[in-house]
Amino acid sequence: MQRYLSANWIYPITSQPIANGVLEVSAAGEILKIFTQEEAEAKSIGHVEKFEGVLVPGFVNTHCHLELSHLFGKIPEQTGLSAFVREIVAQRAAADEVVIAAMQQADKQMYENGIVAVGDISNVLLSKVVKQNSPLYYHTFVEVFGFNHPSQPIMEEAVKIRDTYWPLNASVVPHAPYSVSTELFQLIEKNTRPQDILSIHNQETAAENEFFEKGTGDFELTYQRLGIPKSQAHGTGENAIRYHLPQMPPNRTLLVHNTFTSKADVDFALAQHKDLYWCLCPNANVYIEDNLPEVTLFMQPQVKVTLGTDSLASNHQLSILAEMQTLQQRKRIAFEELLAWGTINGAMFLGVESQFGSFEVGKKPGVNLVDLSETKIIKSNHVKRLI
């Protein structure tokens, strides 16, 4: 039996907001009709469920690390990326049942926070069982890294994991510029299929740019500790994005974090790659570096922005609305802009915009209730999932 849902405002995303509109939704969650208040009254629709707040489609989380969920609350905040990575390496090992139980709870939390689709970073196959039994849509990015190890075995293992994720969608992607050699980038390109979408951590810390420009800083010290010799890529006078982006395949690609990306970097990227998306994970940036990207750099028509939560190792919750709230509070970004980033843009990157991302007849995007002030300020990061 269909439901009729109404609120102070409905945000379809691909069309203008509707004051006191009514959504007709099937029992299976399909959008059957969107009525204006006048149309609903003319049809004398009964049994309308009325809510205070705004109705928005389900959120899309384009960057998550489900495998790190068991590290919730275990890593200190604002230590910088190098120290954070060292803690991940030191504490990551745990029994499979512990990791799976934590992933199941994280998956449940995302569902309750109104998320409908996720781009998830994985290094092993362990998350497949969670994803197969989840109501959420997942695309898994099988992440590879290696600067001083033979690249062929790394790639062979990653391709094996990617293929074993079937029937779930997965692709092999580089971790970050400071952790992927030119040889490994070449193998990634060789093994990237036409249908694959890609992801890479980009300019998450100032030390990342320093390492490529000057060959100095925290990452040089990390290389020394690990016994990894610097390569010709380090100390070139050019920063991280100029190293990795020309080596990326032309497939649709997500640049993640972008905390220390400049206008010149954005201009370079747009000229270099024709199908880019830029993912912002503000709460993780604050947790790790106590810094945020210069968001206005990405607010131009040709730049497509999405939102991510990163992991529970670097965040207090997995909530796209909480990410939106942080950007609105700290960067004064308009609600409508943030909402597009957290819905349709993410769906387009994942290639699932035919189902998610907007209220349109025939879609099953999920329906969330959000508390919004008259001035369109997010009043709470709590989401009520209606469908």
Image: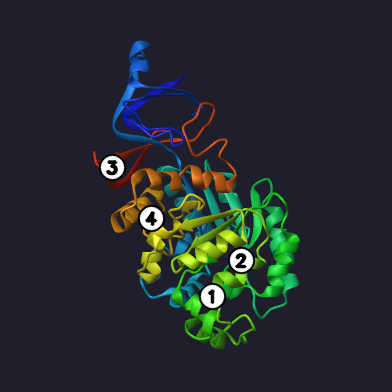
Q: CA distance from mark 4 to mark 3?
A: 23 Å
Residue 270 horizontal side relative to residue 161, left or right: left
Q: Earlier in the sequence, mark 1 or mark 2?
A: 1
Q: Nearer the viewer, mark 1 or mark 3?
A: 1
* Image coordinates for residue 298, horizontal then vertical, percent: 45, 57
Pointer 4 or 1: first along the chain: 1
Mark 4 lies on a secondary structure that is loop
Residue denoted by label 2: 245
Which residue in the structure is indicated by mark 3? 376
On screen, 226 above or below 311? Answer: below
Pick the front one: 249 or 188 = 249
Name the residue type under label 4: Gln
Name the amino acid, label 1.
Answer: Asn
- Residue beneath the point at 24% across and 38% down: 374
Which residue of the protein is positioned furthest toward the left in this rendering?
A: 374
Q: Can you identify the residue that label 1 sits on? A: 239
The Cα–Cα distance between marks 1 and 3, rounded to whole angstroms, is 38 Å
Mark 4: few/some/many CA within 10 Å (<14, 14-19, 20+): many
Decide: marks 4, 1 in contact (CB < 8 A)? no
| 34 left or right of 182 in image | left
Which of label 4 and label 3 is nearer to you?
A: 3
Ranked by sequence position, the earlier of labels 1 and 3 is 1
Report the quarter where the C terminus lies.
top left
Whether residues under marks 4 and 3 lie with C-beta atoms below 8 angstroms apart, the answer is no
- What element does badge 2 sit on? helix
Please identify, in this view, whether the residue under mark 4 or under mark 1 is nearer the observer. 1
- Total number of numbered labels? 4
Determine whether, in the image, residue 352 is placed left or right of residue 377.
right
User: Is residue 113 at least partly visible in the picture?
Assistant: no
Residue 317's label in the rendered image is: 4
Measure how far apart labels 2 and 3 are at the Cα level. Answer: 37 Å
Could you tell me if the residues under marks 2 and 4 are in contact, i.e. CB atoms within 8 Å?
A: no
